[in-house]
Amino acid sequence: MRRSFLTMLALPALFVVVLVAMASIFIVDEREKALIMRLGRVVNVQEEPGLGFKMPFLDDVVKYDSRILGLPTQPLEVTPLDDRRLVVDAFARWRITDVVRFRQAVGTGGIEAALTRLDPIVNAAIREVLGSVPSTTVLSDDRTVLMNQIRDEARRNSAGLGVEVIDVRLTRTDLPEQNLNATYARMRAEREREAADEIARGGEAAQRVRAAADRTVVELTSEARKRAEVVRGEADAERNAIYAAAFGRDPEFFAFTRSMTSYERAIRGDNSSIVMQPDSEFFSYLKSDGAANASPVPPSPPIQTGDAGDAAAEDEELVIPTVTDREGNELGAAAGVRLTPMPESLTTPPEDGPAVIVPEPADGVEPPAQADQPEGN
């Protein structure tokens, strides 16, 4: 009976021992840090992973995550140094370094209370650092220096919380929504202005080229017309010389030819009525052909014209004439136009027209006062 009684007492005692042992032992994970609290006061810190011991029923164990934690911030508006408002979105990485100070700073709120305390610290650091630089620096691709400054500022301000800010990153930096349309409109207007300037410069250059081409055309046309008039005048002078030489051989024949031309002009189908005296000098060659008064002169040496002159011109060497304008510039050089090669004798028009050789009149025959060009043949 005594043995049975001792056995009955040993079982409850063993149960109590096991319960006390379980209440005094706790496990710290490698991702955690633990505080041993006795009646609300920190009595021990367990930062190494493994088993830990505490006073059963008196001590409490509070565990905190020792890994790197994230802190997403809400988008906030900042005003850089050039007073250009920007919307900045960022996030921070932090971890607990001093669990005792962390407990004293956040109390029983834990991680959530720490996030509430860290958010304004990080936002203040962002505003302070970005407010000291112009917006072009904030919007640039390389913002590592700015992010390091924000991290250092947030780390100094959060040291009293027992945490360490490891990194701060700017994820988005943009203009406010109400300013985007105005900015896009300004950029569009700037591009349109540049395009208009380019179009205007192109039009100006085209107008200069067109004006130079028109001037060259006018100069070339004027020079060609001048040379044509010179050649035409020389030809007319040579023709008049031939006519004068031909008619000067027989003045009576010249008078007869002029009378025939006058008859042809005066007596037409639509105007055939003539009122004049029958014995008028106008009808003298209707009564007689004037052969009795003819006194032909021996022919003078012929003037070389026609095919012979052309053949001589063809034998000449072709050269490109050099013609300049009033300013001394070669015509067509600016526009890349070259004059047509021509015989050397025609490149420089003669200053004086060819002399007209009038044959000597026969004895007793007066030369005509003026050799007019006939209108007919």
Image (spheres, grey):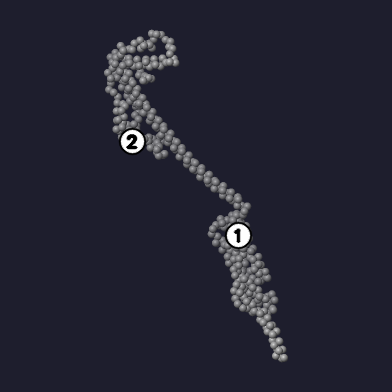
**Dot 2: within a 10 Å radius of its alpha carbon, few (fewer than 14), some, or many (20 or more) residues?**
some
Q: Can you identify the residue that label 2 sits on? A: 319
Q: Is residue 119 left or right of residue 323?
A: right
Q: Quadrant of the C terminus?
A: top left
Q: Secondary structure at mark 1?
A: strand
**Label 1 close to label 2 by CB (< 8 Å):** no
Amino acid identity at mark 2: Val
Q: Residue at x 66, y 69 (%)?
A: 110
Q: Position of residue 228 (x, y in %)?
A: 38, 29
Q: Residue at x 66, y 71 (%)?
A: 104
Q: Secondary structure at mark 2?
A: strand
Q: Position of residue 3 (x, y in %)?
A: 70, 90
Q: Is residue 164 visible?
A: no
Q: Is the residue 331 above or below the residue 366 in the image?
A: below
Q: Can you identify the residue that label 1 sits on? A: 89
Circle count: 2
> How far apart in space, not on screen, are marks 1 and 2 (Cα)?
81 Å
**In front of the other: 20 or 62:** 20
Q: Is residue 81 left or right of residue 56?
A: left
Q: Quadrant of the N terminus?
A: bottom right
Q: Position of residue 348 (x, y in %)?
A: 34, 32
Q: Quadrant of residue 230?
A: top left
Q: Is the residue 152 above or below the residue 248 in the image?
A: below
Amino acid identity at mark 1: Asp
* Dot 1 or dot 2, earlier in sequence: 1
**Dot 1: within a 10 Å radius of its alpha carbon, few (fewer than 14), some, or many (20 or more) residues?**
some
